[in-house]
Image: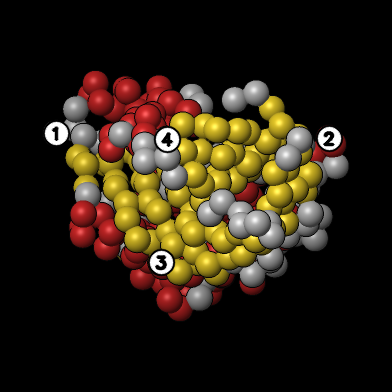
Amino acid sequence: MKNPVFLIFFVLMFGGCISVMEKAGRAVDGSASAEKKVSVYRASIKDGAAQDLAVTVIKNKTGEQSVLITLDKFPMIRLRGSMPDENGAFSLNSIEYLSGSVHGWNEYSMDILGTGSLFFGETCVLEINDEIEQIQISSGRIQRYDNRITGAEALTSLRNRNERIIATTAWMAAFDPPEKQSIKDIEGFETFWEPVLFPELVSKKKRPSGWAQEGDAFVKIEDIRWNTSYTERTFSEELHIVRNSGTMLRDWEETLSWIYFTYEWENIKKALSQKITLQSVKK
């Protein structure tokens, strides 16, 4: 039986700001206190930047410094890189993801390959080559209600989920949205895609036209009757079992922000590939 106090805690926690969740996740291994900010630089859309973002120089307990790049629109991720050399060249090493829902949270570090230039002074000038390659999730943890999953079990689960999310967002990218559709944030993303992915769960007026047809087959999984004929008509073959089994719904409910940032990954890279001047701010 799931602990009701724990459930209330997560409803409150994930209904609030991400900083609360970061403390709940990263503080578990001491990472919240193991690194200290050395300097912080920010750029904003109102000042001409493509994204509201920050570059933070941090120092660990051994004195080693590294760089964190964060984007306000995507608070669930931060990109970690090396300090620049004397020529300003630096490398991106990982994406660190942390986010959750009322069901719990997912946290991982994914190895990446990327390079760019970074210069520090009174301002910070950042430019990243647009080819940032995601390699593989190398570590992570999962919290499902009052059950914490770590080690090899967590790594396998996170990697499998990532493969499903990549397949889902690749299908989304090939799907033709309405001509005037504009997805500006995660709320708009959820509003547009939920009726397409799960018409069985939304009101009739939100369902895609013709989603159910005479003679359609259904399968009942955990009290939901999935229209398997709609699945076959609409989704790529590799996603059929994912949707019909309810796995796609679990991914959506537990890791919406993960799906969203994966969907937006090309736009993230494009925004970071521009030369960005950031202003120094107080830590």
Q: Residues within 10 Å of mark 3 (few under 14, many from 20)?
A: some
Disc on the earlier residue, 4 or 1: 1
- The residue mark sitting in front, 3 or 1, is 3
| Residue to which mark 4 is pinned | 35
Q: Secondary structure at mark 2?
A: helix
Q: Residue at x 43, y 76 (%)?
A: 238
Check whether the beta carbons of the residues at disc 4 and disc 3 lie within 8 A of each other: no
* Residue situated furthest front in the rendering: 86
Q: Kindly tell me whether residue 138 is visible in this rendering.
A: yes
Disc on the earlier residue, 3 or 2: 2
Mark 4–mark 1 Cα distance, whole angstroms, equals 37 Å
| Residue to which mark 3 is pinned | 136
* Residue situated furthest left in the rendering: 1
| Residue to which mark 1 is pinned | 1
Q: Residue at x 55, y 33 (%)?
A: 38
Disc on the earlier residue, 3 or 1: 1
Q: Residues within 10 Å of mark 1 (few under 14, many from 20)?
A: few
Q: Where is residue 204 drawn, in percent x and y?
A: 57, 47
- The residue mark sitting in front, 4 or 3, is 4
